[in-house]
Amino acid sequence: MKSVNPYIIIGQGLAGTILAHHFLEAEIPFEIWDSPETHFNSSQAAGGIFNPVTGRKLEQTWLADELFNYLFEFYPRVEATLSTQFFHPMPLFRPFANEEMKTWLVERKNEIHHEYLRWESEGVWVNKAGWVDVVKLLRVSRDYFEAKGLLKIGVCAEPKGIYCEGFHGQKNPLWSCLPFLPAKGELMEIRSSQPSQEYILNKNGFVLPLGNQHFKVGATYSWKEYSNETTPEALADLQAKLQVMGVDSYEILVQKTGIRPATQDRRPFVGFHPSLEAGIFNGFGSKGVSLMPYFAKQWTDEILGRSSVHSEVSIRRFYHLFSV
Ligand SMILES: Cc1cc2nc3c(=O)[nH]c(=O)nc-3n(C[C@H](O)[C@H](O)[C@H](O)COP(=O)(O)OP(=O)(O)OC[C@H]3O[C@@H](n4cnc5c(N)ncnc54)[C@H](O)[C@@H]3O)c2cc1C
């Protein structure tokens, strides 16, 4: 971006927080604005899972090696900076969906296999998976930024800055031409003695152990409406997921909701506006925990003139949509 000094980061969700940590490390001056009273925060509802394997065919996620090598460096580094723990590498088990799928996958095991998989008779173990306690990362980072005098509460009046607004970004006239495709999501926290406390169970949903027989269960997808209200439909969906994962005795502690800032081409929006003093770091959809660190580093390096943001992520791919 042309010369804005210090940078104004707008939004202290997971995106703004991770970008701010990169700016701090690179000694790029900034202040960070947040307004959860007027713009609800979706990161508070995140499962926080990172998982390099996706889809029915157990494929590696896009850029898995780059993303996962970097996130295993980044989160522990921030833990040291903040003197706290929120990064929890943990085995993840994906049972085969059914006998037919098991046969199909096992017959193709040699073609499908990659370094993130370990095969067992009833499913696969996923290496390099785990979860980030997003609520804790945000809370401790907020205190840290505040102590440094970098945090401002409210909506920044100046129409310039680096916008990390999550799903609210689609209503911002600066960015409304970008092809957002938000997805509402809900999860719940339960107490139960049934699931394992040692690993994340992932079968058309997930059961994530938090300790002391406390688990997160998720997550739903819906495109009907984008309020921050929980719904009975999602509750029923979550209970059905639990049933499929073999859990039928539990106490529901809380139900949470948020909006994933997803995009039509399933790639984030990172970069500067073609003509204004504004930038965007958004569109991380359902994979913010694994995508944000790597692309925050790439963009920081681009700002320092060291390299460029990946072409599939840079908003240069949409410059033709902006009227200049
Ligand atoms: C149910 C659910 C489960 C999920 N599970 C996972 C998971 O397991 N793993 C994973 O990687 N991802 C998961 N996600 C996705 C993940 O939560 C998102 O990718 C991520 O939280 C988005 O963060 P964000 O910072 O872009 O947006 P947000 O968290 O919404 O943050 C935006 C922030 O900006 C502020 N803001 C907005 N506009 C303004 C403004 N104009 N002025 C000032 N402040 C402003 C808001 O107050 C808010 O604090 C899940 C999402 C949901 C809903």
Image (cartoon, grey):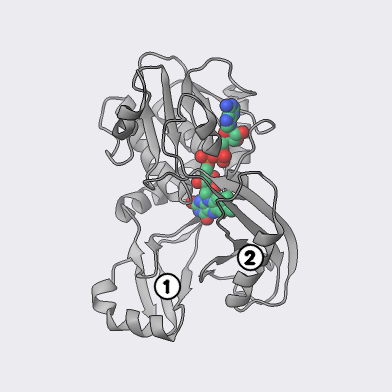
Q: State which quadrant residue 56 falls in.
A: bottom left
The residue under the point 50% across, 43% down is: 261
On screen, residue 1 above or below 261? above
On screen, residue 101 above or below 33? below
Which SS class for mark 1? strand
Picture coordinates of residue 256 (x, y %)? 67, 52
Q: Which residue is mark 2?
A: 238
The residue under the point 50% across, 26% down is: 9
Left or right placement of residue 186 versus residue 127 in this view: right
On screen, residue 202 above or below 138? below
The residue under the point 31% across, 52% down is: 63
Count residues near mark 2 (Cα–Cα under 10 Å), then give few for <14, some for 14-19, many for 20+: many
Picture coordinates of residue 299 (x, y %)? 35, 32
Picture coordinates of residue 170 (x, y %)? 50, 34
What is the number of the mark on residue 125? 1
Which SS class for mark 2? helix
